[in-house]
Image (spheres, grey):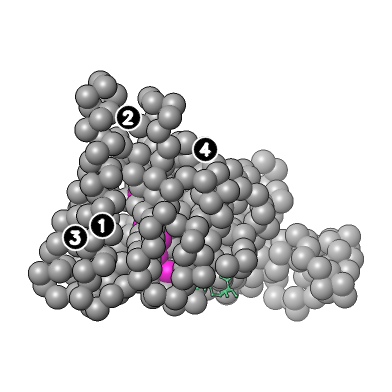
Amino acid sequence: MIYKKMRLCNIPTFTFYLLKSPLMCIHFLKSKITKEHNRYFEVLNILNTLRIECSNYDTVNEKGKHSLKCLYDYDNKSIYVKLRFLRKVNEEEYEKFRNSVDIHCDYGMSNLTTKKGYFHFVVYMKLEPLYETSIDKYSMAIGTYHKGLLTWNYAEYPHILVLGETGQGKSVFIRYLLKEIFNVGYDVWCIDGKKIDYSKVKSMFKQYCANDSNKSNIILTLEMFKDEMQLRYDSMVQRGIYNYFEDESLEPVFLLIDEYLTIIETADKKEQTVIKKLVSEIIWLGRAAGYFLIVTMQRADAKYIDGAIRDNFACRVVVGKASKESYSMIFDRKLNGFEKGRAWVQINNDLQIISIPFYNDF
Ligand SMILES: Nc1ncnc2c1ncn2[C@@H]1O[C@H](COP(=O)(O)OP(=O)(O)OP(=O)(O)O)[C@@H](O)[C@H]1O
Ligand SMILES: [Mg+2]
């Protein structure tokens, strides 16, 4: 990586753009006129934000010496920043700087790391989502990340929890997953918490159940799913098979529980206990039997989603922008959200940012 030094001066944005690179500027102007997405625009935009924050945090002494040294490099996916204050500051000042950049630019950012006396962070540019699908008996694509399609190996890291506040893109994300599963014809069961989202594609599911006020249909569907899973598991054990993919003829089966929190919150205590117990049983045996949960909810509520349940979802996704509490409950760390179409994903303990293709065909 060849780092360049950030110019520390108070100049108008456009002058900065001109100084930065006349070529970049031409690309930038072209993208403004054609309204086309242009990587140069993003680079300039982010670098300008960085420059402004540097000016805000920098001081110049009587000898004209700056108190901040900021270096950057970029490729077509990310901007890499390294930073050192030349005046005495504690680590919090670096965190404050990083957060100021984060607040003023609408991009995903990594956390701070330290290396050789510098504090580093990465700004991730918007990734154009790939409108591709990829699924097999073990894994499926869940979005686009900086290396291409990000696949979730559900056989190894079973069950996915998708959190998104209203309008942040849960349904679009689930549609992408369903599209993949429907394409290959694996069984999907659906418990539709809103009673409307998936009713249009009812016939695509092996079983479809809308949220009902006394929860009897939901409980029945969960029981049927669990029984089918148990039946497969018992037959596997009889044949000395302990994982569904050891048998060529066994395919994965999915259960989508949409708006799990709504379902739980509208159930009475007794029904809640039954539903939670069934969900736990599916979680425990699902991995070996090849029965996987896809659960969505609008927010994380400690009352219903405790750490133990959460940890059973080896893949966790938060789409768009969510509350600080949701990020810390789902990922156990402080994160900022995005515009619609992007998400934080954690598979096992690996955290990534993804772009989600916008499918709205059902
Ligand atoms: N991946 C995406 N790319 C582009 N736009 C998106 C994307 N995801 C969501 N949007 C925009 O956000 C809108 C709302 O998304 P969606 O219906 O998926 O939200 P939701 O989380 O399911 O909301 P609710 O909780 O109310 O059901 C979409 O109609 C679309 O305009
Ligand atoms: Mg929705």
Start-end of magenta stretch: 159-164
* Quarter where residue 285 is shown: top left
* Rendered-image quadrant of the C terminus: bottom right
Other-residue count near label 1 (Cα within 10 Å), few / some / many at <14 / 14–19 / ≥20: many
Q: Does the rendering let one see residue 316?
A: no
Q: Which residue is mark 2?
A: 243
Pair 3/1: label in front: 1
Residue 78: percent from left, percent from top: 64, 53
Kindly identify the amino acid type of the residue bearing the numbered disc 1: Leu
Please name the residue shown 43% across and 48% down the image.
187
Pair 1/2: label in front: 1
Mark 4 lies on a secondary structure that is: loop
Q: Which mark is residue 31?
A: none
Q: Which residue is mark 4?
A: 136
Q: Specify the principal SS of the magenta part.
A: strand
* Rendered-image quadrant of the N terminus: top right
Kindly identify the amino acid type of the residue bearing the numbered disc 4: Asp
Q: Residue furthest top?
A: 240
Tell me which numbered mark, 4 or 3, is placed earlier along the sequence: 4
80, above or below 262, in the image:
above
Mark 2 lies on a secondary structure that is: loop
